[in-house]
Image (spheres, grey):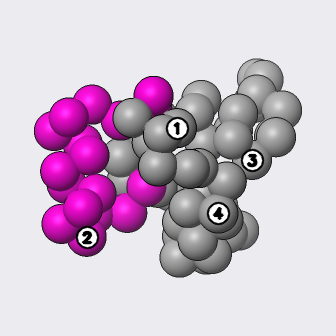
């Protein structure tokens, strides 16, 4: 997922800080968890809504 104006690596680092190992299981399927453990970023695995929720951002309205 691309978030304009933000460095994906910075966002991924912040998401890792916010999520404990237990919480990862709440947000990721078993397949996504395997992808994460193999190096895939949380930015690519989490939904836009999950990322906004974790970062405390307001939902985008049109």
Percent from the top left, x then y, of residue 12?
Answer: 54, 66
Comes first in the chain, label 2 or label 1: 1
Q: Quadrant of the C terminus?
A: top right
Q: Which residue is mark 2?
A: 39
The answer to whether residue 9 is visible is yes
Q: Please rate how many residues cluster around mark 1, counting C-alpha atoms within 10 Å: few if below 14, some from 14 to 19, many from 20.
A: few
Q: Which residue is mark 4?
A: 17
Q: Which residue is mark 1?
A: 23
Q: Is residue 28 left or right of residue 32?
A: right
Comes first in the chain, label 4 or label 2: 4
Q: Is residue 33 left or right of residue 24?
A: left
Q: Which residue is mark 3?
A: 55
Q: Nearer the viewer, residue 26 or 59?
A: 26
Comes first in the chain, label 4 or label 1: 4
Q: Please rate how many residues cluster around mark 4, counting C-alpha atoms within 10 Å: few if below 14, some from 14 to 19, many from 20.
A: few
The quadrant in which residue 60 appears is top right
Comes first in the chain, label 3 or label 4: 4
* Mark 3 to mark 4 CA distance (whole Å): 11 Å
Residue positioned 70% across, 33% down in the render: 53
Q: 5 above or below 51?
A: below
Percent from the top left, x then y, of residue 24?
Answer: 45, 42
Percent from the top left, x then y, of residue 38?
Answer: 18, 66
Residue positioned 82% across, 40% down in the render: 56
The quadrant in which residue 49 appears is top right
Q: Please rate how many residues cluster around mark 2, counting C-alpha atoms within 10 Å: few if below 14, some from 14 to 19, many from 20.
A: few
Q: Is residue 12 left or right of residue 44?
A: right
Q: Secondary structure at mark 4?
A: helix
Q: Secondary structure at mark 2?
A: loop
């Amino acid at each position: 997922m691309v978030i304009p104006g933000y460095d994906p690596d910075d966002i991924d680092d912040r998401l890792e800080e916010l999520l404990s190992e237990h919480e990862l299981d709440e947000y990721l399927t078993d397949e996504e968890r395997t992808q994460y453990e193999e190096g895939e970023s949380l930015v690519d695995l989490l939904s836009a809504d999950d990322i906004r929720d974790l970062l405390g951002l307001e939902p985008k309205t049109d």
